[in-house]
Amino acid sequence: MGRRRFLRDLGYMSAAGGIFLSGLEFNGIFGVFEDGRKEDVIKVPKTPTSHLYPARRNPGFKLDRPLTDELVAGKYNNFYEFSTGKSVWKHVDKMQIRPWTVEVAGLVAKPRTYDIDELVRMMRLEERLYRLRCVEAWAMAVPWTGFPMRDFVKLMNPLSSAKYIRMQTFMKPEWAPSQRLRFWQPWPYEEGLTMAEATNELTMLVTGIYGHELPRQHGAPLRLITPWKYGFKSIKSIVRIEFTDRQPATFWNTAAPDEYDFFANVNPNIPHPRWSQKTEKIIGTDEERQTILYNGYGEYVSDIYKKAG
């Protein structure tokens, strides 16, 4: 979706409020198309914790490129539960993001289930500007709001035997057509990190984007962000976080082990069968850039993998 094609198809953005869907009110960010159609591409939820946005930006995380336009980022997503195409925003209206709970389980001192708004209030939110790199060789630059996962891990007080964190998203075929129609895939979507990865300075649990709460196509109400890894690693709409002593199975590594490994680190020297990883195309401008090992975040994470051998 090049910038010229985007501007041809889309006239302008405007904000409007009062959309009521799936038991929750939303503010709409609309696209007005050349033929006069006006569609609410991004629906920002109004929740008990909406007043916490925008959060203070952490100045320690800077970009080497402009931020991706919000409407561009809202129209171009992978969320395979809803669609194998990029227009996820057209398919998420049945998804209910309140009430929402997150179960913390496994090797922790006190396993329990948290209401999402309770969890958000427990943490200190901040905004960080990160590069996002997809294994399909496209890239964005995104302002995420959330909290460092290492702060969450410390609060959960895991046992010393915990070596990995396993995360799981919802299983709701009534919301998500692919969970019903693509029944052979290993639903629900699961991902995992080593404890060293989960407690790295970069790793975030994210609740917001562009200064407001996450819309559903971006993985509302809680998702993972690991900016040195390919985007599929950053699991969306998390409902369960388990501390474990065993390396967890992950969705794409289970579905296609010859194409996707557990770590999924950005690496221009390891090709994918369908997409060269040497370069990346910036969504919204079609600019091509050279891919950098660890997506340019090697100073933060390379020691993890040296220690791992």
Image (cartoon, grey):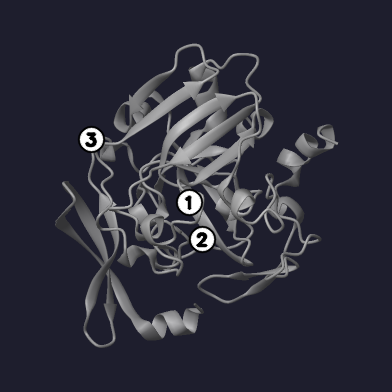
Q: Amino acid at mark 2?
A: Leu
Q: What's the residue at 38%, 64% (across, down)?
A: 88
Query: Is residue 130 in sight in this rendering?
Result: yes
Query: Is residue 201 in sight in this rendering?
Result: no
Task: Establish if 107 lies above or below 40.
Answer: above
Q: Amino acid at mark 3?
A: Pro
Which numbered disc, 1 or 2, marks the residue that appears first in the sequence?
Answer: 2
Circle 3 — which element? loop
The quarter of the displayed image where residue 259 is located: bottom right
**Mark identifier at residue 217:** none
Q: What's the residue at 25%, 88% (across, down)?
A: 35
The answer to the question of whether label 1 and label 2 lie on touching residues, with beta carbons closer than 8 A, is yes
Tell me where residue 289 appears, x and y as whole percent.
Answer: 69, 69
Circle 2 — which element? loop
**Mark identifier at residue 143:** 1
Decide if residue 13 is on the left or right side of residue 63: left
The residue labelled by disc 2 is: 67
Decide if residue 32 is on the left or right side of residue 8: left
Q: Amino acid at mark 1?
A: Pro
In which quadrant will I find the C terminus?
A: top right
Task: Establish if 114 lies above or below 192.
Answer: above
Tell me where residue 8 appears, x and y as whole percent.
Answer: 39, 86
> What's the CA distance linking mark 1 and mark 3?
22 Å
Counting other residues with Cα less than 10 Å from the Cα at mark 3, is it few (<14), some (14-19), or many (20 or more)? few
Frontmost of labels 1 and 3 is: 3
The residue labelled by disc 3 is: 48
Task: Establish if 146 lies above or below 38.
Answer: above
Frontmost of labels 3 and 2 is: 3
